[in-house]
Image (tube, rainbow, N blue to C red):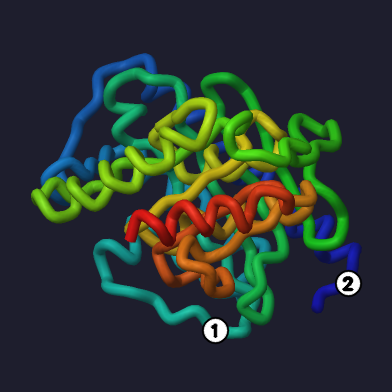
Amino acid sequence: MADNDSLSQFLASAIDAAHNAGEIIRKGFYSTKHVEHKGQVDLVTETDKACEDLIFNHLRQIYPTHKFIGEETTAAFGTTELTDEPTWIVDPLDGTTNFVHGFPFVCVSIGLTIGKVPTVGVVYNPIINELFTGIRGKGAFLNGNSIKVSSKSDLISSLLVTEAGTKRDQLSVDACTKRINNLLLKVRSLRMTGSCALNLCGIACGRLDVMFELGFGGPWDVAGGAVIVREAGGVIFDPFGADFDITSQRVAASNPLLKDALLDVLREAE
């Protein structure tokens, strides 16, 4: 485990990188987008690529020995193994579909794992100017103010957030809607914001009470948010009850009071 001084320094560097990338996103958000398709509904823009280059160049200069995993580089060069080395895991633009449509839920997500444990997290939405940060053992913050998860104790008064995923085959869509049908009977309401990282931050600051997502892009969607949720007093876990695995492409999060109730409903829907 790195000492506190270096963790604070890692956080400061990540915030700088996120602000710089945020500038590019903000400019791109209000101008014409050039869009490519990764899959049927999965999009990538030149902004994604520019932001990832900028973030990695910034951090590599300061931490030449650290490892790097990014959505766009990984998409281009296959998966990168997560090792025990300090590893920066970056989603340069989470919410690309939102970005393309001009819907203001977009963010930069930067996480640092040490010994495979998410240790520093930064999630920055440059359009509504919200910066979520967390350091393992040091609390979670929104624009510098301490945040914590909600105190809701029953699902019926909870706001659930999930996503429809990027697969549009009948089997995937049916499984998704079955889960949602089941949950809608048991929660107050449902949101789909289009950004896994911002959903996690919504749990952390108590705007949202329960979240789960299956089949998202990769560890870059959750590496930053995982630290922030835990430091805000929340729990992050596998939607089917196992321990959270940053590489599994499945995530659930809530305040500690709602975890078992959420798992029960998800099990029923399987």
Quadrant of image for the C terminus: bottom left
Would you place residue 258 above or below residue 10 in this image?
Answer: above
Residue contact at pointers 1 and 2, CB within 8 angstroms: no
Q: Residue furthest top?
A: 30
Front residue (pair 33, 151) = 151
Residue 160 screen position, x and y as percent: 51, 36
Image vertical order of residue 167 relative to residue 181, above or below:
below
Q: In this view, does 16 lie above or below 76?
A: above
First in sequence: mark 1 or mark 2? 2
Relative to residue 38, is residue 223 drawn left or right? right
Whole-percent x, y for residue 176 in the image: 27, 47
Question: Gap in Å between the C-alphas at discs 1 and 2?
Answer: 19 Å
Callout 2 amino acid:
Asp
Left/right of residue 61 with respect to residue 233 in the rendered view: left
Crowdedness of circle 1 by 10 Å Cα count: few (<14), some, many (20+)? few
Going by the numbered disc 1, the residue's amino acid type is: Thr
**Which residue is under mark 1?**
83
31, 129: nearer the viewer: 129
Q: Which residue is drawn at 68% across and 75% down?
A: 114
Asked where in the image residue 130 lies, by quadrant, the reply is top right
Q: Residue 136: where, in percent of width, then height?
A: 79, 61
